[in-house]
Amino acid sequence: MTTSTTPATWRPEAFTAAVGDGVVEMARDHRGAVERGPARKQAGNAVLELVGGRAIRPVNVRVGGFYRAPAPEDLRALDLTVERT
């Protein structure tokens, strides 16, 4: 038996009508916020890489904290990256 992940009532045109065109539409009124999004995503990835060992599915995380603390000079460099966003 196979199951579909798409509900029978799913209609993309109804979703687009309810939500709008997403980023394109938002950029018309909030261009700065849209442009800051990718920079903030990169800064968040940098934080996770430093603390967790990698940006996606970090390996340095454990219950109650981390296996290894970042070096102070790495934290200072990261601070500058995050402040720019």
Image (spheres, grey):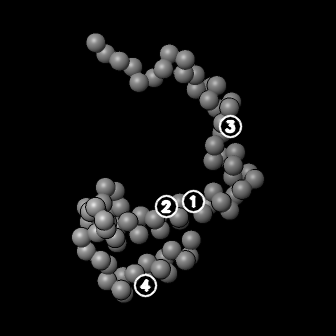
Q: CA distance from mark 2 to mark 4?
A: 19 Å
Q: CA distance from mark 4 to mark 3?
A: 41 Å
Q: CA distance from mark 2 to mark 3?
A: 23 Å
Q: Which image quarter: residue 19?
A: top right
Three-letter code, disc 1? Gly
Q: Residues within 10 Å of mark 2 (few under 14, many from 20)?
A: few
The residue under the point 46% across, 65% down is: 44
- Residue linked to disc 2: 41
Mark positioned earlier in the residue sequence (2 or 4): 2
Q: Position of residue 2 (x, y in %)?
A: 31, 16
Residues marked 1 and 3 touching at CB (< 8 Å) = no
Q: Quadrant of the C terminus?
A: bottom right
Three-letter code, disc 4? Arg
- Residue linked to disc 4: 76
Q: CA distance from mark 1 to mark 2?
A: 6 Å
Q: For this rendering, which residue is in front, 42 or 75?
A: 75
Q: Secondary structure at mark 4?
A: helix
- Residue linked to disc 1: 37
Q: Position of residue 71 (x, y in %)?
A: 31, 83
Q: Residues within 10 Å of mark 4 (few under 14, many from 20)?
A: few
Three-letter code, disc 3? Gly
